[in-house]
């Protein structure tokens, strides 16, 4: 049974563990991987047109840096693995965008790593993994 795995990836240790997990599953099942990097972005409607233009310019620069810094090494690793993959970079609320990506690509599973923050930190600041458990449109594996 093949599947399509969306992996939330930010080049952190937990994200690399999640990618390794998904890569192993994809190899065993003949599945494919979508490596998704989501950058937090919130639109401010009270900005002037000039400020909005500057934010748009910075956004393009950030995407270019993410393509090189975050996706560059992972792309090389996946090319060597023999698993079919693609990369996606988006802006927005991380958990919501990962769910959108899963729906858009017909994913059968989502995989993310967790960083082991304390319960207090997760309650105060939130957790992508915790949010995904509640809103994921497909099964979601949280890799410790």
Image (cartoon, helix red, strand yellow):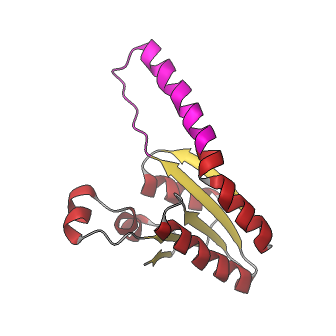
Q: Is residue 18 left or right of residue 116?
A: right
Q: Horizontal and vertical percent for residue 85?
A: 73, 64
Answer above or below: position of 41 versus 93. Answer: above
Residue at the image point whose x is 26% and y is 56% from the top: 125
82 left or right of 128 in image: right
Residue 82 shown left or right of residue 107 in the figure: right
Is residue 86 in sight in this rendering? yes
Q: Choose top left, top right, bottom left or bottom right for residue 11.
A: bottom right
28 in the magenta segment: no
Residue nearer the viewer, 28 or 10: 10
Q: Quadrant of residue 23?
A: bottom right
Q: Residue at x 24, y 70 (%)?
A: 118
Nearest to the observer: residue 74 or residue 84: 74
Residue 47 appears left or right of 124 = right
Q: How many labels were placed on the picture?
A: 0
- Residue 105 position, x and y percent, is 65, 60
- Residue at image point 62% right, 70% down: 5
Percent x, y of residue 90: 55, 46
* Range drawn in magenta: 40-65
């Amino acid at each position: 049974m093949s599947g399509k795995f969306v992996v939330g990836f930010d080049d952190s240790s937990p994200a690399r563990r999640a990618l390794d997990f998904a890569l192993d599953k994809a190899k065993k099942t003949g599945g494919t991987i979508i490596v998704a990097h989501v950058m937090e972005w919130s639109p401010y409607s009270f900005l002037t047109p000039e400020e909005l233009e500057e934010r748009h310019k910075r956004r393009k620069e950030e995407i270019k840096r993410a393509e090189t810094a975050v996706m560059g090494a992972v792309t090389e690793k996946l090319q060597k693995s023999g698993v079919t993959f693609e990369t996606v970079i988006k802006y927005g609320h991380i958990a919501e965008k990962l769910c959108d990506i899963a729906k858009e690509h017909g994913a059968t599973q989502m995989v993310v790593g967790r960083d082991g923050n304390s319960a207090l930190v997760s309650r105060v600041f939130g957790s992508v993994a915790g949010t995904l458990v509640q809103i994921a449109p497909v099964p979601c594996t949280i890799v410790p």
